[in-house]
């Protein structure tokens, strides 16, 4: 009988490739920025750590004690920025800053102003329809 792999096994195999891992972390971070889903973000980090040799290997590369790294990764809270940067460096990547507008993460200011203007006009129309004196 053929042995089937789980989705997690396939994911970990793909994340062994550093380019795939970086893309995956980038998506995890973007999702975190959009909805603040810390557990999803931390699971992304845990998956990449697992794929890149596990806690012991990444701990060696980051000069963080394996027990400490394990505790950080199992926490429900996002790691401090300096700790996160250290973990990323051990994974062969870095944190970078990009404009949100280019990523579609914040609304276009002109569009937001135009939308607000339309809302106000609609409210004015509703008020004039409900007020018989107009």
Image (cartoon, helix red, strand yellow):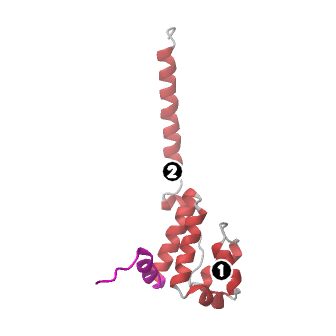
Decide which of 120, 69 is in the foreground and name it: 69
Badge 1: how crowded within 10 Å, few (<14), some, or many (20+)?
some
Regarding residue 98, the answer to whether it shows in the image is no
Point out the tag, 2 or 1, that comes first from the N-terminus.
Answer: 1
Q: Between tags 2 and 1, which lies in front?
A: 1
Residue annotated with mark 2: 108
* Residue at (70, 83) in percent of width and height: 67
* Residue at (51, 34) in percent of width and height: 117
Above-or-below relation of 80 to 101: below
Q: Secondary structure at mark 2?
A: loop
Quadrant the N terminus occupies? bottom left
| Left or right position of 68 against 93 | right
Above-or-below relation of 8 to 130: below
| Left or right position of 2 against 51 | left
Q: How many marks?
A: 2
Decide which of 107, 24 is in the foreground and name it: 24
* Residue at (53, 41) in percent of width and height: 113
Residue 13 on the magenta segment: yes
Looking at the rendering, which quadrant does residue 58 occupy? bottom right
Query: Outermost residue, left direction?
Result: 1
**Residue 70, labelled with which disc?**
1
Badge 2: how crowded within 10 Å, few (<14), some, or many (20+)?
few
Decide which of 50, 32 is in the foreground and name it: 50
CA–CA distance between discs 2 and 1?
Answer: 40 Å
Magenta-colored span: 1-18
**Residue 106, labelled with which disc?**
none
Looking at the rendering, which quadrant does residue 75 occupy? bottom right
Residue 94: percent from the left, percent from the top?
Answer: 59, 79
Residue 82: percent from the left, percent from the top?
Answer: 70, 76
Residue 32: percent from the left, percent from the top?
Answer: 57, 63
């Amino acid at each position: 009988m053929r042995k089937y792999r789980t989705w997690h096994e396939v994911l970990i195999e793909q994340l062994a490739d550093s380019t795939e891992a970086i893309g995956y972390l980038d998506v995890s971070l973007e999702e975190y920025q959009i909805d603040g889903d810390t557990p999803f973000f931390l699971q992304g980090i845990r998956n990449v750590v697992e794929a890149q040799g596990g806690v012991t290997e990444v701990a060696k590369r980051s000069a963080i004690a394996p027990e400490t790294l394990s505790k950080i990764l199992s926490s429900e809270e996002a790691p401090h920025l300096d700790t996160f940067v250290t973990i990323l460096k051990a994974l062969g990547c870095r944190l970078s800053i990009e404009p949100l507008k280019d990523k579609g993460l914040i609304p276009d200011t002109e569009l937001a102003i135009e939308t607000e203007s339309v809302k106000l006009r609609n409210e004015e129309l509703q008020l004039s329809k409900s007020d018989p004196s107009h």
